[in-house]
Image (tube, rainbow, N blue to C red):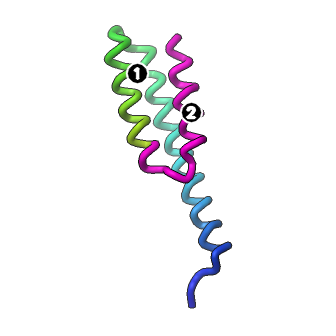
Amino acid sequence: MGYSKDRVSIYQSIDARETVRRLRTEITRLRQIIKKSQEDKKALRRVESILKMWASIINPDYKMIYAEIKRVLALRD
């Protein structure tokens, strides 16, 4: 017996929520990197590369990730 489409989408959304939770933890860590860094441009590039990696992992939640990226970059100013 296979999974119904509803059940599969529920499991996918649970997995996506867990991944987004981990993303938020990572973003908190990245905020600390930005605050501590003397060389702001290097820190920003590091943050952007890590966030792009996360965004490529979680395609279904790309809009959520993009919003988080914008929030992180706004902290820089």
Count how many numbered circles sit on residues in the image.
Answer: 2
Residue at 35% across, 23% down:
45
Q: Is residue 19 left or right of residue 49?
A: right
Mark 2–mark 1 Cα distance, whole angstroms, equals 16 Å
Specify the quadrant that holds the N terminus.
Answer: bottom right
Q: Residue furthest right?
A: 6
Q: Earlier in the sequence, mark 2 or mark 1?
A: 1
Which numbered circle lies on residue 43? none
Q: Is residue 33 above or below residue 9?
A: above
- The 10 Å Cα crowd at callout 2, few under 14, some 14 to 19, many 20 or more, is some
User: In the visual, does 10 lie left or right of 73?
Assistant: right
49 shown above or below 4: above
Q: Amino acid at mark 2?
A: Glu
Where are the magenta residues, as a range? 55-77
- Residue designated by label 1: 33
Q: For the point 51% across and 21% down, which residue is it? A: 73
Would you name the residue on which mark 2 appears?
A: 68
Which of pointers 2 and 1 indicates the residue nearer the eye?
Answer: 2
Q: Main secondary structure of the magenta part?
A: helix
Local secondary structure at mark 1: helix
Q: Residue 37: give x, y in percent of width and height.
A: 37, 13
How far across and how far down the image is residue 53, in percent?
38, 41
**Image position, residue 19 (x, y; %):** 51, 50
Q: Report the side of 47 relative to 63 (left or right).
A: left
Residue 24, image x, y percentages: 54, 38
Residue type at tag 1 = Ile
Residue 13 vs 32, above or below: the answer is below
Circle 2 SS class: helix
Which quadrant of the view contains residue 12?
A: bottom right
Q: Quadrant of residue 35?
A: top left
Looking at the picture, does residue 49 appear above or below residue 16?
A: above
Q: Is residue 6 left or right of residue 76?
A: right
